[in-house]
Amino acid sequence: MMSLQFATVAHASRFSPPPKHSFHSIKGRSTAGKRTVGMPNAGGFSSPPRAMPKACLAGAAASADAVENAVEEAMMPKHVAIIMDGNGKWAKDRKLAAGDGHRAGWKNLTTLISKCCELRIETLTIFAFSNDSKRSQMEEDLMMRSTENYIRTDVKELITRHGILFSMIGNKSRLPVSLQSSISWAEETSKGNKGMNLVMAANYSGRDDVVQATKKISSKVERGVLRAADIDQTMFEQELMTNTLESPNPDLLIRTNGELGISGFLLWQLAYTEFYFVDKLFPDFGEDDLRQALASYGCRQRRYGQRKN
């Protein structure tokens, strides 16, 4: 079962709270058509035993330093995924052009990538844009240009500075040729690097990912290469777009802009992922916010479908 987490304002927390936020857990358990919402004093999660970071036990008076200690003491997630939501609203709120919002978002992403490298997170997957968003042609063109520019500038610098390994998931064939070229260049240039995996989901749909994996397996069955009886979850995962990653399933998903959905992102891979939702718009989601999300993750006990003790 997936467990969800979102940040709210002016409540005490059973985790180690930052000055302005606390956390409530939402379990996707239905009662008469409604989700059950756990309050801050609700019972914790149960999972294979692991020591609870000191900051998680500090109560409502925990300091920002305690939050940092939680990040340092807890088991860090190997794979973090981020849905970068709110660039357009950020620009609109400031009466700026949409392009300014995209640029602010990309600039902030570079800061967060560097921090993830510093924290030795193994994989960061970012949802740049889906293939089913309802945008105007002007917005579409702007998104493609800004993505290409980001790869040619910031990603190039990150490859040099941090030795990141860049890859893209999604339908590359439907992207502009110049953007396809930029993606291929970044993938080829970073090939063999030993730094963090930076995965960009561009023109991506979790449903399409599942469909294309199903087609590949069906083709093998039709050709007699594979028996239908031999198909299992491990085999299916090997046909998903994330199959090149050592840890293809995110440990932690972060979404900004107060949205509580996943918008078709990594539908298969998120089965046992911990969710963290925050109201901040993505350009405003800084290093301290990232640390808080990681501290929240460190205070959870993951069950992976096992019953609570």
Image (cartoon, rainbow, N blue to C red):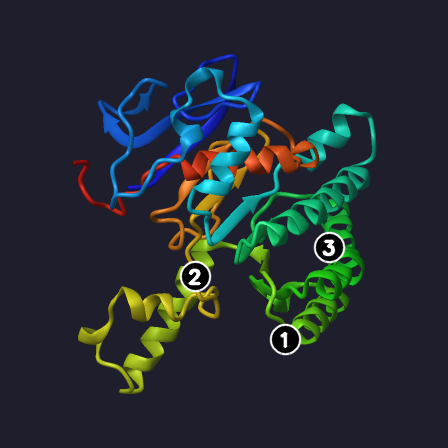
SS assignment at label 1 = loop
Residue underneath mark 2: 247
**Quadrant where the C terminus is found in the figure:** top left
The numbered mark, 3 or 2, whose residue comes first in the sequence reads 3
Residue underneath mark 1: 191
Please state which amino acid type lies under the numbered disc 1: Lys
Tell me residue 135's x, y (percent).
Answer: 67, 43
Picture residue at 64% right of the left edge, 64% below the top? 164
Picture residue at 31% right of the left edge, 86% below the top? 223
- Of residues 12 and 243, the one nearer the viewer is 12
Answer whether residue 128 is visible to the viewer in this image. Answer: no
Residue 227's quadrant in the figure?
Answer: bottom left
- Of residues 149 and 192, the one nearer the viewer is 192
Please state which amino acid type lies under the numbered disc 3: Thr
SS assignment at label 3 = helix
Label 2 environment density (alpha carbons within 10 Å; few <14, some 14–19, many ≥20)? some
Q: Is residue 273 left or right of residue 139?
A: left
Dot in front, 1 or 3: 1
Tell me residue 128's x, y (percent).
Answer: 63, 50
Q: Are marks 1 and 2 in contact (CB under 8 Å)?
A: no
In the orientation shown, which residue stands out farthest toward the bottom? 224
Q: Disc number at residue 147?
A: 3
